[in-house]
Image (cartoon, rainbow, N blue to C red):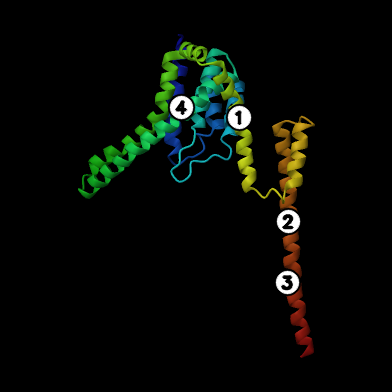
Amino acid sequence: MSGIQILQDILIIILAGYMTIDQNGLVIMSWFPVIVGTIAGIIMGDLTTALTIAGTFQLMMLGVAALGGASAPNYGLATIIGVFIATRTGTGIKSAIAVGLPVGLLAIQLEVVARIIANFLAHKMQSDNNKSSWKKMNLEAWLGPILFSLQTALPAALIVFFGPEVVTFILKVVPKWVTDGLTVAGGMLPVVGIGMLLHYMPVKKFLPYIIVGFVFAAYLNIGVLGIALIGFAAAYWYFFSESKKATEVETASASGVQDDDEGDDYDE
């Protein structure tokens, strides 16, 4: 293994661990697949493949949120592992999904374990605070970020340390119907995510725009960027049209009130 590969392995593990710390900190953007996928692609030296994988996992997580203490698949970790496997082995996006997605699902269990331990840790810190043992409490506070970083750094380290050979062995041992099923599921999850988003959006109000976007994508083969630009133009036009209408209504209302007042003065 060359020095560059060793450096890549270390940086991938660090990225996986830091991603979780940042997710639970002030910045809540760097754990998104498109963000960590871009960074992982720069580390692995294949940005094109990384962005393809990151975009796939980003679509999978649309409409999925860990609300109220619930746990959702860690698509950020799945992206990092997927990018690492795909670029190191050269097996492409199918292997990225087949390996990355199960690791992301495994992270759910690790997250639950980390939260259970963190609960006991929080009570211990509270007890030390009541005893005025603030130095001890401050030291224990560092265990929280370390604990949550390990929930993603450890799976990444296992994949990195055992290398592509172990992954290749796993892919050979795992039945083909399992990997094919994961690939199919990977293709269905974006649709489910988009469907969940549409459920909470005012679809009836903006149905013409949705139909136009579907026609552009399905029949005219316009790329996502092109459709996004068209959507931005439509949103821009709609926003200023509605703003203009609201202004005209307010102006008309103000003029009506003023006319009524003038009429009263004239009558008097």
How many angstroms separate mark 4 from mark 2 (CA)?
44 Å
The mark lying in front, picked from 3 and 4, is: 4
| Neighbours of disc 1 within 10 Å: few (<14), some (14-19), many (20+) | some
- Inspect the image, locate mark 3, and give the three-letter code of the amino acid beneath it: Ala
Instruction: Read off the residue under disc 3.
Output: 254
**How many numbered markers are drawn?**
4
* Residue under pointer 1: 55
Nearest to N terminus: mark 3 or mark 1: 1
Q: Quadrant of residue 194?
A: top right
Between the residue at mark 1 and the residue at mark 2, the CA separation in whole angstroms equals 33 Å
Instruction: Please name which of the two marks, 3 or 2, marks the residue nearer to the observer.
Output: 2
Nearer the observer, 27 or 127: 127
- Cβ atoms at labels 3 and 4 below 8 Å apart: no
**Residue behind mark 4:** 15
Q: Is residue 42 visible?
A: no
Given residues 216 and 243, the one toward you in this image is 216
Query: Do residues under tags 4 and 2 come within 8 Å of each other at their CB atoms?
Result: no
Q: CA distance from mark 4 to mark 1?
A: 18 Å
Q: Amino acid at mark 4?
A: Leu
Distance between the alpha carbons at the discs numbered 3 and 2: 18 Å
Pointer 2 residue: 242
Lower sequence index among marks 3 and 4: 4
At label 1, the amino acid type is Gly
| Disc with the residue nearer the chain's start (4 vs 1) | 4
